[in-house]
Image: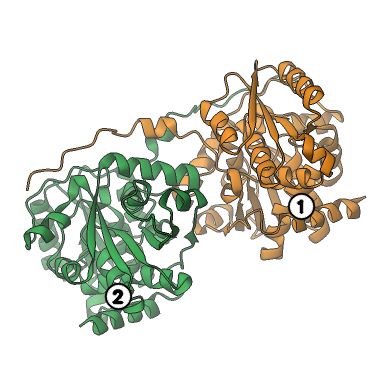
Chain colours: A orange, B green
Amino acid sequence: MRDSLWREVVAAQERLVGVAHKTPIFTCSELDRIAASTVFLKAESFQRTGSFKFRGAYNAISCLSETERACGVITHSSGNHGQAVALAARILDVPAIVVMPEDAPKVKRSSAEGYGAKVFTCNGTQEAREKTTRMLVARTGATFIDSHDDPRVIAGQGTAAAELIAEIHLLDVLLAPVGGGGLISGTAIAAKHLLPSARVIGCEPAGADDAFRSLARGERILDFVPDTIADGLRTPLGANTFELIRQMVDDIVVVPERAIIDAMRFVWERMKLVIEPSSAVAVAPLLTGEFGGGGERIGVILSGGNVDLESFFSALPRVDRVPPVS
Amino acid sequence: MRDSLWREVVAAQERLVGVAHKTPIFTCSELDRIAASTVFLKAESFQRTGSFKFRGAYNAISCLSETERACGVITHSSGNHGQAVALAARILDVPAIVVMPEDAPKVKRSSAEGYGAKVFTCNGTQEAREKTTRMLVARTGATFIDSHDDPRVIAGQGTAAAELIAEIHLLDVLLAPVGGGGLISGTAIAAKHLLPSARVIGCEPAGADDAFRSLARGERILDFVPDTIADGLRTPLGANTFELIRQMVDDIVVVPERAIIDAMRFVWERMKLVIEPSSAVAVAPLLTGEFGGGGERIGVILSGGNVDLESFFSALPRVDRVPPVS
């Protein structure tokens, strides 16, 4: 099974050539010093639409038949996956619908519309989103693109780790955030094929640690209320990603909220990279001493850089000053 | 004269090999679309100490004799030049003193100290800084490293544009911010040698437009009170940089404060790069339509990424949440 999963990652890589960005890899001597390791950060914040989600969305839509493409695609997401589906569909000339809660930030709505997607709103419950989506699927025949549990999406996400390993070669450990589990599953598929002895660690916010608890219990926990700043990681695991993580991920680390914010600040201040809180979840264990310490070579997937900066910029002076008279 | 200036840039490049970072160059399709040009941004935010200043400081200190090095170096700066002198001196095993105003942010003081410099404080006037510096020079015999008017500093700063041109080859226009004038002078020296037909444009905040007004008047304006968010550009031109700019820079663009903030936000949000306001001054003319529009190839020096993020991060929740009970 692992071989066939890996072949899907390779196929995704081929589909993404010339479409997805080959994102840069950053290092930081201060981070290496703190973690007593050599750390390589794959900055998917520089991926198209600002997160790794473009890889999976584009791969999934590429796999559709002509007939399916003609009917379009649909997803529900107010976040990175919605933007990714919108842009991937536009590139592939496929109509796209994104279902969003009524209270989603305007900027997310206009961003999806900017990529040419039709946006439908509904109330914010999971039930309402699913009902609206089903209704629209029935009406349009559009194919639903799940954000994390679709095997084509998982294969696409695995291309980030595959690129990192192709460039850095040897890694002892790979860290990636865990939300719905698509990224960590794809990362594990790539890593276990290319570097069988490397450990793959999922990083989860304490305020949405369903993967940690699901693995401990041996079944998926679905009835939890996430409460974390890492807005990209509030989704529960899917049935597929739960199985993949159980089989291929070595451990799940649970990261306190404070450590997430501290890690985000470290990356902004020291590395000059705008990353979102979800990305910081995979950096935090290196700053808190949870990982590293033995000179390991550690790869980190920085998942994205989509942060609401309104509060920062609205605090800056907005009035044009009059230049002093000479 | 231009040839000998260029030879100093080449010598600086040789001194900086393996010491300064070769910073990455970024592009942005949305910026290209808005500017109707192809724009290449040289991200000196990823330079050591977070700004281009390291290049000039290291080059200047490298040029000192053994005797001079033994007596150490001194500068007055609460900003990027102070950090740059501190780190460059540490690398070259030279004692360093940085004179700062008493009210300089603690983080700047501890950063310079972190690089091993001794920090002396005085009151915030230019007069007090110069007096304290003279007193310390008399006491220690340290060599003063000027932030912008020292020819060795100017040559060092020119290596950023030289690197950009070596990688991108053809450019029609180069944009760089103007404060004391060291960066734009070095940029002009490199560009006029490597790409004689390229236009070199200095970008200055409206709240500190002394270069623009000095050129118009034909003599340096020194008695102005800067009032701009671009804290790196509040310094007046030096005697050397004024002459170099007069001879080699094609034009100075004055950028309103609002356009600086808008450009900074664009680069953070769309390009996921933390840049400081001074850097945004050289991006703004591309977003406001002042430059571009004709398919030009435009190079921009993003001077640095040292921003006080305290207000942003203090607005985020700091309390660890209790994970929900499963």
Residue B47 in the image: x percent, y percent?
42, 61
The answer to whether residue B164 is visible is: yes
Image-quadrant location for residue A194: bottom right
Q: Which residue is mark 2?
A: B192
Tell me the CA gap for discs 1 and 2: 52 Å
Q: Which residue is mark 1?
A: A199
Task: Please say if the residues under marks 1 and 2 sit with CB atoms less than 8 Å apart.
Answer: no
Q: Quadrant of the C terminus of chain B?
A: top right
Residue at 25%, 75% in the rendered image = B70
Q: Chain of mark 2?
A: B
Please give the label number shown on residue B188: none
Q: Is residue B192 left or right of residue A209?
A: left
Give the camera-side residue of B75 and B37: B37
Q: Quadrant of the N terminus of chain B?
A: bottom left
Q: Secondary structure at mark 2?
A: helix
Amino acid at dot 2: Lys
Q: Is residue B232 above or below residue A151?
A: below
Give the camera-side residue of A313 and B113: A313
Image-quadrant location for residue A36: bottom right
Q: Secondary structure at mark 1?
A: strand
Give the camera-side residue of B227 and B27: B27
Residue B127 in the image: x percent, y percent?
8, 53
The answer to whether residue B57 is visible is: no
> Could you classify mark 2 by the number of other residues whose Cα lies within 10 Å: few (under 14), some (14-19), or many (20 or more)?
some
Residue A155 in the image: x percent, y percent?
79, 48
Residue A202 in the image: x percent, y percent?
72, 42
> Could you classify mark 1 by the number of other residues whose Cα lies within 10 Å: few (under 14), some (14-19), or many (20 or more)?
some
Q: Chain of mark 1?
A: A
Amino acid at dot 1: Arg
Extreme residue in the right direction: A1
Residue at 31%, 56% in the rendered image = B80
Q: Is residue B227 above or below residue B43?
A: above
